[in-house]
Amino acid sequence: MGWKYKFLFWISSIFWLICFSSGYVPEDNILIDCGSPNNTKVGDRVFQADNSSISQLLSTTEAILAVTNSTSIPSSFDSNLYQTARIFRGVSQYTFPIKKQGRHWIRLYFFPFSFGNFNMSTAKFSVSAQGFTLLEDFQVHSGALMKEFSLNISSNQLMVTFTPSFDSFAFVNALEVISLPDKVIPDHVDFVGPKGDDENLWKQALETLIRVNMGNRTVSPQNDTLWRLWVSDDTFLNDNNDLVNYVSNITSVDYTVTNVTSEIGPPEMYGTMTRLDTEFQPTLKANMTWHFNVDPGFDYLLRFHFCDVQHLRPVTLFNVYVNSWLASTVDLPKETANKLGAPYYMDVVTRISGDRNLNVSVGTFNIGDIVYPEAILNGLEIMKMSNSDESLVLDLERSSKMKAGIIVGIVVGSVVVVLVVVFFFLFLCIRRSLLHSGQGKEDYPFARNEMARGSTDGGAFFSSSKIGYRFSLSVIQEATNNFSEALVIGVGGFGKVYKGALKDETKVAVKRGALQSHQGLVEFRTEIEMLSQFRHRHLVSLIGYCNEQNERIIIYEYMEKGSLKNHLYGSDVPCLSWKQRLEICIGAARGLYYLHTGSAKSIIHRDVKSANILLDENFMAKVADFGLSKTGPEIDQTHVSTAVKGSFGYLDPEYLSTQQLTEKSDVYSFGVVMFEVLCGRPVIDPSLPREKVYLVEWVTKWQERMQLEEVIDPRLEGQIKMDSVQKFVEIADKCLAEYGANRPTMGEVLWHLEYALRLQATDENSNHAGDVPSQMNHVNRLPSIEYSTGSITDMSDVSMSKVFAQMVREDPR
Ligand SMILES: *[C@@H]1O[C@H](CO)[C@@H](O)[C@H](O)[C@H]1NC(C)=O
Ligand SMILES: *[C@@H]1O[C@H](CO)[C@@H](O)[C@H](O)[C@H]1NC(C)=O
Ligand SMILES: *[C@@H]1O[C@H](CO)[C@@H](O)[C@H](O)[C@H]1NC(C)=O
Ligand SMILES: *[C@@H]1O[C@H](CO)[C@@H](O)[C@H](O)[C@H]1NC(C)=O
Ligand SMILES: *[C@@H]1O[C@H](CO)[C@@H](O)[C@H](O)[C@H]1NC(C)=O
Ligand SMILES: *[C@@H]1O[C@H](CO)[C@@H](O)[C@H](O)[C@H]1NC(C)=O
Ligand SMILES: *[C@@H]1O[C@H](CO)[C@@H](O)[C@H](O)[C@H]1NC(C)=O
Ligand SMILES: *[C@@H]1O[C@H](CO)[C@@H](O)[C@H](O)[C@H]1NC(C)=O
Ligand SMILES: *[C@@H]1O[C@H](CO)[C@@H](O)[C@H](O)[C@H]1NC(C)=O
Ligand SMILES: *[C@@H]1O[C@H](CO)[C@@H](O)[C@H](O)[C@H]1NC(C)=O
Ligand SMILES: *[C@@H]1O[C@H](CO)[C@@H](O)[C@H](O)[C@H]1NC(C)=O
């Protein structure tokens, strides 16, 4: 008999030992010491070497293993993890198998050090998982940092993607993916604050901002069942409050009374508290308040932990406030069955919209003159909740501000329109008179006032009234027949361009950034910001964008006739006449001129080429692709220093050698485009004999010999007036001057081009005498019509009924 009981006793004690000594054992417990060839022990946990089969790493470029020999590694318990890192120069993705669906923590460890040419303090990157943006344009300047996120994973794998920002790289020192007990994150929480509904949490991603242990004591991750760090509250508590004291009685914590377990909070956290006591001033009402800094624009989940470890009074009622909003009045003895050491917690969600302050107070409760003198708090967790963009980072901040601007704009409405029109005409007059008195242009046979009008091309018109807006992915899927391959009209390094039709039958071009795209977030954002700021009849219009689920999609007006490049060579579309070519050049030059001069700060396109000049159904040219655009130099500077970007063959040699960017770099590229237009051949054509390979060299050579006929597109033969061509080549040649200072401005180029068109048109007129009046009229009329009404139509023009096009960009950068 006895041995049986003994045996049972042994079995049960072994069982309890397993259950309690090792604490919670997560079903998914993936720990990786990134970049390390060896397994690494941290406390009782083993982080696997980065070569192990528990995860799969895919990268567009080689992922570098980095080892530090730095001595400045922080001497924390987890310092072993900071000896190595994995560096990603391209988009890279870890894939982890998931056994248990539900909430998981993703913890990312960062400690920047220098390795070879990589100074991780300068690394800038984004991290996403499950369609959620976890970090964006993120940098760790110094010191070790751990970021913790929680996601509800409903599939059997988890992908964590590292995307370096433009011109940068990404790194990570270690990562953890561990499954949580279901109850740790609730799926429903009450809202506190001005507006908002109770929140369903089960879909959202959370980022843990901080865990605070009250009672002026830090709890290290080894003392926490789920390896959480709880920092001491003393730096957050408002100072000099002599009513506040700290209490510690860890052994008294008793998990048997309430449903709370040590997985919600360890005894080290529940066992210490910060206590407010006004007993000696019985009618005094008081608060203790902790201040935190958070990002505005998000909802936050706050968890308050309470546990009486000191025999408080049998009636203890106190108030809990979040940013002056009463979150709850806590009747602690009731919640804990009046038992010493019984833990209790409470969750609330609040919205932080204005400033960065999050103030949390616990204070006395009173009924009339009766003040209950005690209030306590043992622990506090603050978790940021993902927003409707499925992001934990405010992104496209400017666009959304602009959106708000639109709403205001609509309200203020007609008054503003009138003011704008008046202002615009005033502005026109000022510019006119300035230009009139300014640059002498005697050498051009234009009437002065015409030149002056020309100079106001497009006006400095800032139309913020019609910016593109965010589309949901489903709308785009519908418009493109779920990204049907049959609708692809262009492919490039950035991904694909689809032709699509919105519900109202507006035709659109949909540019979809590939996941592995080199066109990073920065370029995506730049393009949207540029396009939404600048509207002009010679710039391609933005209709909207979408950044749901890791997609980077931009929707443009559809340009029926495709790119200028397509019409010059390499396809079987009908050849453009010389006059059409001149008009296209003039249109593109207007677009660029507007970019350079249309606002206080000039915009440099940086990727001017024939593939980026698109044509609408009437062959009107529009400049496209602003992904590389940059704001020009400040007034008091002459250039912007930047890494060289652009397309091979069109790159300004001065920019290439000095890395100093000015508007004149666009002028150079435009000169190259003009030669393409003249010759109807690619800038670089390796299939040709050696002296012909590089277009610019070849044309320059024949021009010096005064034998331009050799290079002119043979299809133009017979319709082209040599005066016009000579003028054209003369301008292009000036654009290609070695030094930017010697190149004309886009405005000058424009005037010369109009002159070349006039020479050609005069010629045509003399050939077809009957057309003279209308032709002449057309040329002379051109500036005044476009400039006096142009900008106003630019606004209304954006009714998308007549939209077009094709985004063709063959060359990946
Ligand atoms: C990995 O282990 C080997 C042998 O145990 C050791 O020589 C080497 O220094 C370790 N590497 C790192 C990065 O700890
Ligand atoms: C990873 O590297 C360690 C040490 O170099 C080695 O012992 C282990 O077998 C490797 N694991 C895999 C999955 O290759
Ligand atoms: C380690 O330190 C030495 C000099 O202290 C340096 O030359 C070397 O580049 C460092 N190694 C790495 C990987 O940073
Ligand atoms: C790395 O970059 C940071 C910030 O730019 C700089 O302070 C630090 O000196 C750099 N470290 C090295 C080793 O170059
Ligand atoms: C996770 O999501 C599923 C639905 O996909 C939901 O049923 C479940 O309650 C969620 N779990 C948590 C812990 O939020
Ligand atoms: C809190 O703890 C720190 C050290 O851990 C100590 O210096 C400080 O005086 C304590 N504050 C109070 C109010 O006891
Ligand atoms: C855990 O907490 C206890 C009591 O607070 C302390 O004595 C011990 O050093 C802690 N252990 C670690 C690893 O921090
Ligand atoms: C600490 O807790 C024990 C019970 O575990 C209790 O008897 C004791 O009074 C408590 N100490 C204080 C100072 O409250
Ligand atoms: C424990 O949880 C159950 C259901 O989850 C609930 O009905 C009960 O009231 C809880 N008990 C306490 C003491 O909180
Ligand atoms: C939070 O407290 C600070 C300092 O007392 C105060 O300036 C701020 O207005 C408070 N914020 C809110 C939202 O109550
Ligand atoms: C305590 O804080 C709340 C919220 O900020 C406030 O309404 C209340 O007046 C404060 N009480 C005292 C006594 O300061």
Image (cartoon, rainbow, N blue to C red):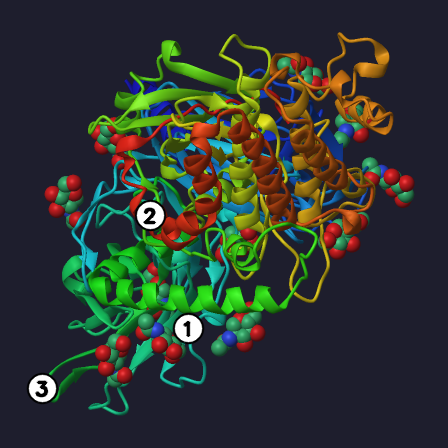
What crowding class fits label 2: few (fewer than 14 Cα within 10 Å), some (14-19), or many (20 or more)?
Answer: some
SS category of the residue bearing label 1: strand
Q: CA distance from mark 2 to mark 3?
A: 67 Å
Q: Quadrant of residue 192?
A: bottom left
Instruction: Specify the amino acid type for callout 1.
Output: Tyr
Residue indicated by mark 1: 246
SS category of the residue bearing label 3: loop
Going from the N terminus, do you reach mark 3 or mark 1 first? 1
Q: Residue at x 29, y 48 (%)?
A: 255
Going from the N terminus, do you reach mark 2 or mark 3 first? 3
Q: Residue at x 67, y 53 (%)?
A: 142
The percent position of residue 607, horizontal first and vertical second, equals 62, 35
Q: In the image, is 484 to the left or to the right of 231?
A: left
The percent position of residue 33, horizontal first and vertical second, equals 63, 31
Label for residue 793?
2
The percent position of residue 230, horizontal first and vertical second, equals 46, 55
Q: Residue at x 55, y 45 (%)?
A: 137
Instruction: Specify the amino acid type for callout 3.
Output: Gly
Of residue 767 and residue 284, the one placed in the foreground of this image is 767
Mark 2 or 3: in front is: 2
Q: Residue at x 34, y 18 (%)?
A: 3
Label for residue 368?
3
Of residue 413 and residue 679, the one placed in the foreground of this image is 679
Instruction: Specify the amino acid type for callout 2.
Output: Thr
Q: Quadrant of residue 647?
A: top right
Residue 421 visible here: yes
Q: In the image, is 676 to the left or to the right of 217?
A: right
Q: Is residue 659 above or below residue 440?
A: above
Q: In the image, is 409 to the left or to the right of 438?
A: left
Locate the C terminus and report the quarter of the image it occupies: top right
